Image (tube, rainbow, N blue to C red):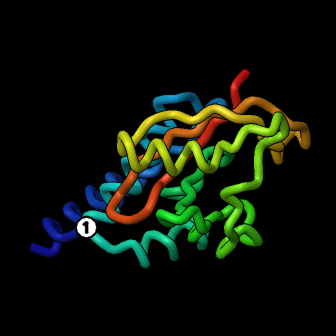
Amino acid sequence: MKTLHTAVLAAALAACAFSAPVLASEPVEKDAIAMVQKGADFMKSASKEEMIKRINAKDPEFVQGPLYLTMRDARGIILANPVNPAMIGKDLVDVPDADGKPFRREILQLAKSKGKGWVDYKFKNPASGKVEAKTTYIQLVGDVTLEAGIYKK
């Protein structure tokens, strides 16, 4: 019986090792969609509050190098941001991107009208320090929007 228990434990640990893949290259659209879906699935089995904690704690399930999950409420207030915690609690809805595009308003409108999709804008890439083209996949989950973005090459 002890051998069976050890085998089951080893199999479970091996499965966990493969459940949070580390991106081998720059993330692409399918990676952003998968990250948001993983967050949505987590919220269905846990809670919004637990998701906020996980994102802000930089849980490797939801923060994988340049790809990470963020969350905002229906008014646009940032609830979780693992890369820039100074944004948490801020209302940045009317702050445009580098080209003057009100992309945060677009995110909220897309969430309200279609529930999910892509929003393109310009944003400072923390890796390069330069303003670059970015696209973010968003999905409305309950009363919040989950987001994961990638820089376009």
| Left or right, 51 with reference to 142 | right
Q: Position of residue 142 (x, y in %)?
A: 32, 63
Residue that appears at 64% across and 30% down: 25
| Left or right, 66 with reference to 131 | left
- Any part of residue 16 in sight: yes
- Any part of residue 18 in sight: no
Residue that appears at 8% across and 73% down: 1
Q: Position of residue 93 (x, y in %)?
A: 66, 57
Comparing 13 with 141, the one in front is: 141
- The answer to whether residue 90 is above or below residue 32 is below
Residue that appears at 57% across and 62% down: 76
| Left or right, 55 with reference to 35 | right
Comparing 101 with 8, the one in front is: 101
| In the image, farthest residue toward the top | 153
Quarter of the image with the C terminus is: top right
- The answer to whether residue 122 is above or below residue 148 is above
Name the secondary structure under disc 1: helix
Q: Position of residue 83 (x, y in %)?
A: 71, 60
| Left or right, 36 with reference to 124 | left
Comparing 97 with 124, the one in front is: 97
Instruction: Quadrant for residue 33, please give it.
Output: top left
Q: Position of residue 104 (x, y in %)?
A: 63, 49
How many marks on residues?
1
| In the image, farthest residue toward the left | 1
Comparing 8 with 48, the one in front is: 48
For the residue carrying disc 1, how many other residues have a C-alpha within 10 Å: few (<14), some (14-19), or many (20+)? Answer: few
Q: Amino acid at mark 1?
A: Ser
Q: Which residue is mark 1?
A: 45
- The answer to whether residue 81 is above or below residue 23 is below
Instruction: Quadrant for residue 48, please give it.
Output: bottom left
